[in-house]
Image (tube, helix red, strand yellow):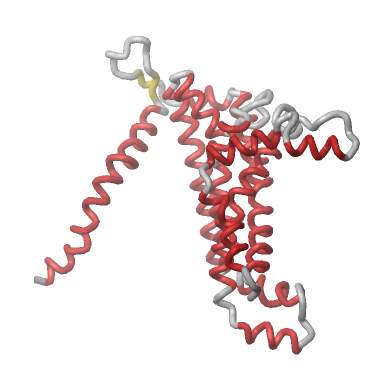
Amino acid sequence: MKITRKLTPYLFLIPALIILSIIVFYPALQAFSLSFTKFGYDLTQPPEWVGLENFKRLAEDKLFRQTLINTLIYLLGVVPPLVFLSLILAIVVNQKLRGINWFRTAYYTPVVVSMVVAGLAWKAIYWSNGILNQFWFSLGFKDGIPWLTSPDFAIWSVMVVTIWKGLGYYMVIYLAGLQGISPELYEAASIEGSDGWKKHWDITIPLMKPYIFLVAVISALSATKVFEEIYLLTQGGPRNATKTVVYYLYEKAFKDLDFNYASTMGLVLFTFILVLSIVNLSLSRKVS
């Protein structure tokens, strides 16, 4: 009887483990093995074992190094605005004002909008005769800004879309934390002379550190795997200025059909995300 009770939870886990094994674990192991092999022209023959040849090729790939740099730039350009702007937005919509629920819904709407719809809309905004350049012309400038066609502007333009899309999502996370802070703390702070935005520096930010860290972790992991925005807006251009590791992996796997090389890139990206997660986990323990 005792043995049955101990085994019961695992019996409920078996269906989920089977599904995960089929759609996650087995493909991951296959990708790992493909990193050390190479397909020949005859698909009826088993793949040839080449050891670390794919990794050597990856180390010599200048385009891959550029995609790594682009991914790092994207990470550093997206995470800080998402962490702090969504916190400010959450503080604003946490006020007890008339119609505040409408504002919360409005700010959250981009989260539920399909990335395809959002990408096409922002692409129209960034067009040479789009809303942004029309506003630019109204200021007296004759030449428009090449938002998506210049290597100097393209990656930053794509970042804006990612930030716009994610603000509402992280706002909700912060809002849950803010509503758990007792109003008595703010009252006590105002008595001590901490009022206005200063009370948020003295009270809100210290108490919201776990939430700030959570948002930083989630947004950082998402930024390293960005794909949809790149695909819809620039497709890695111009001159590979917006091509990230995930998009380069997609090109190699599904355009060039070089699955071995793509699997190698995937393994490197997995290692990078794993290291980032371990660092974040160690920092979270210090924060908590």
Q: Position of residue 97 (x, y in %)?
A: 65, 73
Q: Determine whether 276 is above or below 49 in the image.
A: below
Q: Residue at x 79, y 36 (%)?
A: 134
Residue placed most toward the observer, 265 or 198: 198
Q: Residue at x 45, y 26 (%)?
A: 52
Q: Position of residue 122 (x, y in %)?
A: 64, 38
- Is residue 61 shown left or right of residue 149? left
- Is residue 11 shown left or right of residue 92? left
Q: Position of residue 148 (x, y in %)?
A: 70, 31
Q: Quadrant of residue 191?
A: bottom right
Figure quadrant of the N terminus: bottom left
- Is residue 1 shown left or right of residue 184? left
Q: Quadrant of residue 146?
A: top right
- Is residue 152 shown left or right of residue 44? right
Residue placed most toward the observer, 115 or 288: 115
Q: Determine whether 279 is above or below 124 in the image.
A: below
Q: Residue at x 61, y 45 (%)?
A: 162
Residue placed most toward the observer, 128 or 217: 128
